Image (spheres, rainbow, N blue to C red):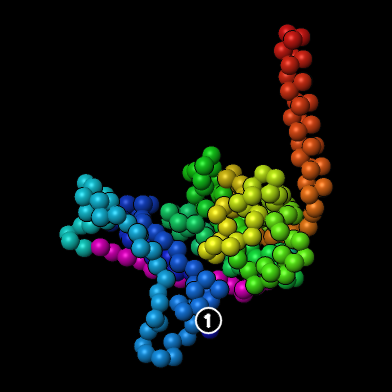
Amino acid sequence: WPLRGRFVVELLNQVSDNHHYSVMLQFDDHICAECASRVVDGDKADTGLGQSQFISHNALLLENNNGYFINDSLFFRIFYEDAGPPNQVAPVNIRMNQFSLWLKREVKWNSAPFFAFERGYQMYLRIDSSGIGDGDGTHMSVYLYLTKGPHDDELEQSGHWPLRGTFTIELLNQQGTSDHSSSLVFSALWCSECTNRVMEGVTAAKGWGLSQYISHQDIGDNGYLREDSLYFRISYAESGEREILIILIGFIAMLLLCCCYCCCKFCYK
């Protein structure tokens, strides 16, 4: 106690195994103490965790051949996964189980929250197995989200807001060869909604990540997936606005050089 873990509630499509309505419910005392605490008085908790608009009546009942409502019956499946040890400090190792099932679900997977450093920012990893945006259907998408944390006041007093620094997300190769690694630089210069302190709700309005983190083909062919599980390592390095500006200026310089090269090549022709 308190309860920590993920429940996925699926309304099963009775025609196709790939189009279930899903919602993931993350139980944690930081998110909802009344939902996750042990029941001492009475036989059930006073508050539940759920989604008030899980599926519209139109999608459920009125659309032809949607496969959810057949013979006056609905079928649900509930899946539980332990969230793992909470409040670890980066670098952290994160395991995602049953990847093949998450690939079919229209719901995102969230890791247990962790701290970027001791008494630091609280974050979590969000994974869309089937991909979003330009990675939809071909890649796994990964994003890091800032959450409301217990040390936010201390970070305010020490001048750490907005969040700034570099997170490295590694997908570990379970055959002992090279890992897949990508770095995410957090800065209010290009995403204030990702980096500002969370004042309303629990999670930042937006996450920062990659829609094409790794292709589905590379996941299966190169030793990353074993026993239907993926392993990630997330590390953090603090950086100031000066370092971030240097990175940004270098990136712009590279773009300008590429443009000059293309223009010169075109003029030469």
Residue at the extreme front of the image, as rendered: 157
Q: Please, is residue 125 above or below residue 216 in the view?
A: below
Give the residue at x 52% y 71%. 31
Q: In this rendering, is residue 48 above or below 95? A: below
Q: Amino acid at mark 1?
A: Pro
> Looking at the image, which residue sits at the far left?
71
Residue at position x 48%, y 44% in the image: 137
Does 79 appear in magenta?
yes
Residue 60 lies, in percent from the top left, at: 26, 54
In the depicted structure, whether residue 131 falls above or below residue 267: below
- Is residue 181 visible in this depiction of the protein? no
Badge 1 density bin: few <14, some 14–19, many ≥20, Cα 10 Å: some
- Between 106 and 231, the residue placed more toward the observer is 106
Q: Is residue 22 left or right of residue 158?
A: left
Which residue position holds label 1?
A: 2
Residue at 43% in and 87% down: 39
